[in-house]
Image: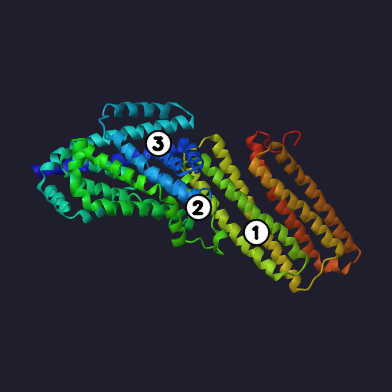
Amino acid sequence: MWHVSATHSLIQLLGAIALLLWGLHMVRTGIVRGFGSQLRTIIGRSVANRVKAMLAGIGVTMVVQSSTATALIVSSFASSGLIGAAPALAVMLGADIGTTLVAQILSFDLTLLSPMLIFIGVVLHKTLERTLHRQIGRAAIGLGLMLLSLKIIVTTSEPMRDSPVLGTLFTSLSGEPLIALLLAALLTWMAHSSLAVVLLVMSFASTGMVSIPLALTMVLGANLGGVLPPVMATLNEGVLARRVTFGNAAFKVIGVAVCLPFVGFLPSLLEQLEGSALRQVVNFHTAFNLMIALVFIFLVPVAARISERLMPLIESADEPERPRFLDTTAIESPAVALNCAAREALRMGEYVETMMRGVITVIQETDTMKTTELKDMDDLVDRLYEDIKIYVTKISRQEVDEPESQRITEILSFATNLEHIGDIIENLLEMAAKKDKKQLRFSDEGIAEIGELHTKVAANLTLAMTVFMSGDIAVAHQLVKQKRVVNALERRVTENHMQRLRQGRRESIETSALHLDILRDLRRIHSHITAVAYPVLDAAGELKKSRLKKGA
């Protein structure tokens, strides 16, 4: 009979744990999507001193309910050079305290609050249209589900106390603290949430399923496992990011190593503070992280210097090939992520601009090294285009409003046009190589006219980048007007070339096909440049169905 009820209880317990994790995910997602930019601003402005940085970490993590999310934001700032290792580590010390304060709040009996939060959250999410209000509703639903799941876990765990199998298992773990520690760390890594595991252990301890010493050991394991997700996430994010996550991991490892031998002596001390098993567990969790913060807040400059020696910043020739601004931690906050994508697209544009300036040199004179350099740069442009496209696609899967959707279109259009321009420039490089191979020479007038058209096109590429970043309607109109100017210039220099052919000029006759192809490709490049203006004008209602409105 017990076997049937235990199986039923186990299924309920697993479902409640899953509900806890899902509720935590909803809270984090709602807060990050609704207030992500403000939270990142708080962290970015908290670098003045260690105490201020730690307080910012406490506040942000209490709101997000995830020290992992805070760690990823901080490490992305460090990777971009926006925050040093010492203040970043101070923020992480605060983040760990923040998770304990959330656990403290959730340890109280808030059962009646659960249905109210779920009801309010559903109303907000379903009836309001503003993204911010919908995300607040999402967070409220998540918090309600977390409270509901904790109640289910406690209720379900009570009949399982009498299980001889579970009794033997937990008794065995009590005798093997290191195994219990590693098991809790593994569960935390799998759940990607130390808060969830601490709440679970807290619930088990409140029903007597787990003894207090074992619960404290598992709390240490949850703290240890909590550093693994950010460490794993920053393995490929560069040295500056790894210094933050590895430094914070070192703090936790040292703290666990010091506390573990004394776990058996702590229950009597904790009982003097509060007799409830549940409160003993959560108080230990808070005390452990407070102890680490109070000790290491004075040592973060030393820790930063040690991390710099152990993980020196080595300049790599391949470093420019990596995206610099595509912060994966910002994807759940579309407004922030789109700004990251726009900065990376602008960086891509700078490479294309360099290619544009360099290609005329290769056309005018033989320069094999320059040709190779520009072709390698085109490969870089292609890779950046793929990275931006994938990143923006991930943003589009989030809950975005109309302006954000329009910005997604603008970024994709800009990046796509830049990629096409890079391909055309590569084609121009092939033409220049063909000219050199056949030892052909343009006429003086012909090369001057190619240079004149190139100068105009290159200037408008800079103008297009201004339009993309500013969204200025007047500048966008100016760019579109330049299309007619460049087309007229291309027709004029083409007619001049045809006139030289009629005169029988030898250089013009030998290079005619190349000359006309270069003019055609420069015009094609300019078409892609002016295309940058159309999404901006369309978003402003400045386009008719088939042509620009009057004044364009």
Dots 1, 2 in contact, CB < 8 A = no
Q: Is residue 263 left or right of 292 when viewed as pictured?
A: left
Q: CA distance from mark 1 to mark 3?
A: 47 Å
Comes first in the chain, label 1 or label 3: 3
| Residue 285 in the image, given as x and y percentages of width and height | 28, 43
Question: What's the residue type where badge 2 is placed?
Answer: Ser
Taking the image as drawn, is residue 442 in sight?
yes
Viewer-nearest of discs 1 and 3: 3
Q: Nearer the viewer, residue 161 or 124?
A: 161
Quarter of the figure that contains the C terminus? top right
- Where is mark 3, residue-wise? 63
Q: Nearer the viewer, residue 501 or 360?
A: 360
Question: What's the residue type where badge 3 is placed?
Answer: Val
| Residue 479 in the image, given as x and y percentages of width and height | 73, 43
Question: What's the residue type where badge 1 is placed?
Answer: Asp
Identify which residue is drawn at 27% across, 49% down: 220
Q: CA distance from mark 1 to mark 2?
A: 31 Å
| Residue 404 in the image, given as x and y percentages of width and height | 55, 38
Identify which residue is drawn at 46% across, 35% down: 34
- Where is mark 2, residue-wise? 79
Q: Is residue 503 left or right of 5 when viewed as pictured?
A: right
Above or below, comparing residue 225 to residue 48 in the picture: below
Badge 3 density bin: few <14, some 14–19, many ≥20, Cα 10 Å: some
- Where is mark 1, residue-wise? 423
